[in-house]
Amino acid sequence: MVGSALVRRLGREEGVSIVIRSRAEVDLMRQDQVEQFLGDEHIDQVYLAAAKVGGIEANHRFPADFIYQNLLMTCNVIHGAHEAGIDRLLFLGSSCIYPRDAAQPMREEALLTGPLELTNEPYAVAKIAGIKLCESFQRQHGRDYRSVMPTNLYGPNDNFDLQTSHVLPALLRKAHQARLDEASAMDVWGSGSPRREFLHVDDLADACVHVMHMGREDYWSAVDERCSHVNVGVGEDISIRTLAGMCAEVAGFRGELRFDASKPDGTPRKLLDVGRLTPLGWELRIALQKGVRDTYDWMKTHWQVISDA
């Protein structure tokens, strides 16, 4: 999802040649393949958006996969970029890096100040390692390796598999299926009380390119070399209950929403402080209601499991 959004955004840049390889062509978990690829292609900038991702259920079932695969990919690409002499890299993390009970909205300085949310701790640890790798290569080798921490993302090419998806695409899929089945009710995981913010992936891509285009002095004067990442978010959140209602409305489902409080809620609230990003000149373009509707339209057209037939 993020990679394709970055390609769409970078495709509008004049004079940019985008180097793309499939997972079958370059396995980012293989150090030899990564180093050969980065060394052979004469790349001058890297956007590291690759990750194994999933919602609460996937994180709960596959913690070893989440920490191992994400650590390996991150280490291989960042170290490989350095070995290839690539001076500019952007690492994409996640808002789950912050402590479970961090003060809201979460500032960049909250990193490593308390325990993580257990339901996604392995993934968060891998993302924290990526931030520290970027900082360490900057401090030791002078590399201009930057990090952005997106909030919850959604949009085209999202994952709508109910076993591995995040909350927003899962709710869209459930609402659509409930409408097709003419169901009287739709089940929603958890109590509905947690609050989250949601950013359209095309807005994230725009923010990434904006941050990457900043001059070296401008970027590093806006951050700290030991807390160098920048939050990318909306600055506003909504409850899962409200989000479920929005997804049901967009999908045309008029039945009952049944919240299963026996299922884990995860972190009570995750709202990013975007006080570092806003002065850097980036602005949000896609409102949540429009973004959810556009994502629903994309899902109906592209997601192979969903069909009105």
Image (spheres, rainbow, N blue to C red):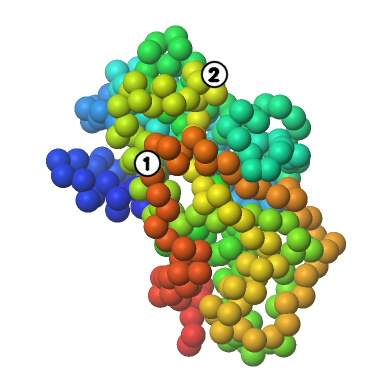
Question: In this rendering, would 192 be left or right of 70?
Answer: right
Q: Work out which residue is located at the far top of the displayed protein and give it.
A: 140
The answer to whether residue 225 of the structure is visible from this angle is: yes
Q: Residue at x 41, y 22 (%)?
A: 220
- The one nearer the camera, 136 or 20, is 136
Q: Residues within 10 Å of mark 2 (few under 14, many from 20)?
A: some
Q: What residue appears at the point 42 percent right and 61 percent down from the top-left corner?
A: 286
Measuring from the top left, give residue 186's x and y in whole percent: 70, 78
Mark 1: secondary structure: loop
Left or right of residue 232: residue 67? right
Q: Secondary structure at mark 2?
A: loop
Above or below: residue 155 compared with residue 99? below
Give amino acid for label 1: Gly
The amino acid sitting under disc 2 is Arg
Which residue was labeled with disc 2? Answer: 226
In this rendered view, identify the residue nearer to me: 21 or 54: 54
Quadrant of the frame with the N terminus: bottom left
Name the disc covering residue 281, or none.
Answer: 1
In front here: 308 or 268?
Answer: 268
Residue 152 position (above or below residue 220): below
